[in-house]
Each structure stands twice: as structure tokens, then as C-alpha cells.
Image: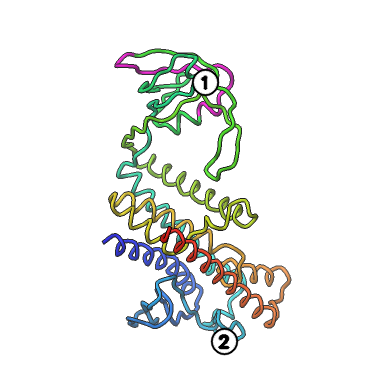
Amino acid sequence: MGWIVSLLVLSGLIFFHELGHYLVARAVGVYVEVFSIGFGKKLFSFWAFNTQWSISAIPLGGYVKMKGQDDADPTKKSYDADSYNTKTPLQKIAILLAGPFANFLLAFVLYLAIGIAGPKALSPVIGDIVKESPAALAGLKSNDTIQSINGIKITTWNDMAEHIASSNGVINLQIIREGYMQNITLTPKITETSDMYGDKVQRKMIGIGSAGVTQELNLSFIQALSYAKEQTVFASTMIFTGVKKLIFGEVPADELGGVISIVKLTSDASADGWMSVFFFAALISVNLGVLNLLPIPALDGGHIMFNLYELITKRAPSEDILLKLTMAGWVILFSLMGLGLYNDIHRLIG
């Protein structure tokens, strides 16, 4: 059942990406010949809105085939009024950006649904305490709950960590210990730690670990909107940074995952309920949006790059250069997909 959910999620994310392209293309007068989820042989298709809608055999993506646009052979063009080729560079860029934008918008909506339903977060309950740390020296104990820092109410572990990291000098903690309120004063210490990418960073800390206690956040609609925005921005920044580190070799290539990893992780998330599926789907949606903006000729980012060149120079790239760059883009794309698939299989067989 989990695998079915994961395939439905992946197909849904692809559908929304391509729907973004489709809607903007139709809005600027481009005839869309085919809207396909998947590649290869068509398993099922029907006609609606003067477009052939299809589900194809290989569920590794999808495409919108517009009149006059053929990624397999970019020299094939049409100059009819309803062709992609007759549109201005800005109109083409709008069509190309619409796919990634749809992914970011979908992620925002999924995070909003989570925010309205009540997302779970780590409570500011202390677990382990580092010996000789500011927390240990000040007398903090396991199972203490931090209520406020310098008079500012603390609701989650992340709130607490951010307040400590941005503090200046001595801080006052109001804690609950065995049902009683206490005040403890201490000075955070700059400590070397690792961020989510494994990089060493200097950060103000007091030497405590989480007890792993979670709570459900009761957010108003306005707070849920803020939560959705923060999560979408955080996920986008995390993935942009991760891709940059991968490109510059700061993250090993064996960390790259492919479609098998996506399906497996989504399947695992489905066992924890719809909220976990929504959260992971939002992260994959942002991932699709970011990756499609990369300036690889076979992706939306590559086509945007060509149109920006035409917009700036007032002339389109030569067909020979366009063909060579597009073929190179497909080689890069399939190489990345192959590496991701290899890593997935390597992890599965141990």
C-alpha cells in the first residue's frame, strides 16, 4: 500500500509541475498537443480541451508537448501563430517558470494544510546535559522544561535554540522542575558543532540535548500561513544549498538519491499518517522546483537560459549550438539519474 501511495504522490507532484506549464502556455496562446504523466509508451490517453492527456509507462517524470517545441530535436520549429516559437522571450520564460512555481506553490499549500491540522514540534524539555557545560554548572537537570528566556515565552525546542544562539551575555531561564517554577541564570558558550550538511560551525550553546518530547502546535490561520511560508523558504534554501555543495564537491556524490529513494521514503512516511506524507511530499515538490531551475539545457532552467540570452542579445542561439547544448544537457541529466539509481540500488543491497 505504501508503494502505491508513493507513486501517487510522485505522479501528483509531476502533474502539478506540468499543469503550471500547461496553464501559462494556454494563457499566452500556445497550442498544447500532449500532456503526459510519465514517458515512453502510452498506457492510457483521452482528449480534452483540444489536448491529448496521457499516462505513460515510465513514471520518472512527465512533459507538456507544445506546438513548435521538441526537446529531442530543437531544430524542429513551427512559426504558426499558436506555436511556442512565435512567442516573445518573456512569454517563453513565463511558461518555463510556471512549472517550478507550481511546485513551490503546491509545497506551500501542503505545509499550510499541516499548519492548520496542527504540526508536531519538539518541546523545550531537557534530556542529556553535557558535563562542565554552562547548563551543568548552572544546575539544569534532565526533564526540566524551559518556559521562557529573558522573559520571552518559549514554545518549541527550535525557539529555545534560536534565542540562545542570538543572545548576548547572560541569559535568564524560567524553567519548570517537578511542577515548580524556578529561575536560572547562565552564560551561553560558543561551541563548535555540525550543521545539517556536516559542516563545522561556531554557535552559542548551553550544553543540553532534547528529551525527545513532542507537542502538537495549535496555530491560527494567520500563524499557519506564516508556518507554511517559513517551511517553504527553509526547504528551498536547504535544497539550493545542498545542490550547490553537491556541485562543488562539498557533499559526496554517494549522497545523491534517485527515484527509488523517493518512493521508499514516501512509502515509509505513509506508515506515519497523512501528515508525514504531506510533509515529505512538500519537500519533494520543492526539490522538483529547485532542480528544474538548474541551468541544464534539458531542464526548464536551461531553456530559461537560452531565452535570457535572446532577450539580452536580441537574437536566438544558433540551431547548431542549441542542438549540441541540448544533447549535452540530456547526457548530464541521464548521468545524474543513473548515479542516483546506482546509489539507490547500492543502499538496497547493503
The quarter of the picture where the N terminus appears is: bottom left
The residue located at (55%, 68%) in the rendering is 300
| Total numbered badges shown on the rendered structure | 2
Asked whether residue 70 appears in the rendered view, the answer is yes
Nearest to the eye among marks 2 and 1: give it.
1
Q: Which residues are magenta?
A: 163-180
Q: Is residue 309 above or below residue 130?
A: below
Q: Is residue 61 magenta?
A: no
Residue 73 occupies quadrant:
bottom right
Q: Residue furthest left?
A: 1
User: For mark 1, what is the residue?
Assistant: 133
Type of colouring: rainbow
Q: Is residue 289 above or below residue 117?
A: below
Q: Is residue 86 above or below residue 205?
A: below
Q: Give the amino acid type for the residue marked by disc 2 in the picture.
A: Ser
User: For mark 2, what is the residue?
Assistant: 78
Q: Residue furthest right?
A: 313
